[in-house]
Image: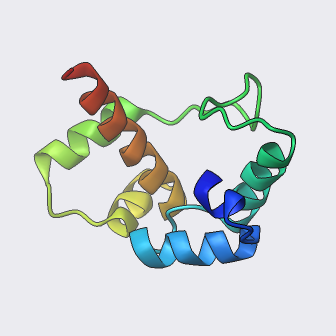
Amino acid sequence: MVYHYKKGWTAAQSFRDLNLLYGEGTIGERQCHEWFARSKTGDTSLEDKFGRGRPSDFDEQALLVAVEEEESLTTRMLAEQFGVDYSIIVRRLQKLVAKQVGSSD
């Protein structure tokens, strides 16, 4: 998104492009607008700010176990199983992959 911002794109354009490229639900339009607002202030940090959003009680370990047990589950199937929106599953899986990639260095 920082690239899109620096190229003069709007948040809506970035939202559409990212979801087209990486799949629907990759990022929400509101989240795109928030990142663009942060970029306007010069904040290009990829770290979340402490206290942003509501606290999560989502069990990432249970998600990891479910995926390892049945790799053919789709994000929508997992969302139904965990009783959350599929976009939450997408973000949590991306977070888990990032943790695994970071720990393999």
Residue at x-position 84% and y-position 48%: 40
Task: Name the quadrant of the C terminus.
Answer: top left
Does residue 90 lie above or below 46 as drawn? below
Which colour style is shown?
Answer: rainbow
Q: Position of residue 72 (x, y in %)?
A: 15, 63
Task: Name the quadrant of the N terminus.
Answer: bottom right
Hey, which residue is sitting farthest front in the picture? 7
Does residue 28 lie above or below 103 as drawn? below
Residue toward you, 11 or 100: 11
Does residue 80 lie above or below 66 as drawn? below
Q: Say whether residue 87 is left or right of residue 70.
A: right
Residue at x-position 33% and y-position 66%: 77
Q: Position of residue 67 (x, y in %)?
A: 21, 48
Q: Say whether residue 74 is left or right of residue 94.
A: left
- Residue 73 appears in which quarter of the rendering? bottom left
Does residue 22 lie above or below 51 as drawn? below
Q: Say whether residue 96 is left or right of residue 3.
A: left
Residue toward you, 64 or 28: 28
Q: Position of residue 65 (x, y in %)?
A: 22, 37
Q: How many marks?
A: 0
Q: Position of residue 32 (x, y in %)?
A: 70, 59
Residue at x-position 30% and y-position 39%: 97
Residue toward you, 73 or 81: 73
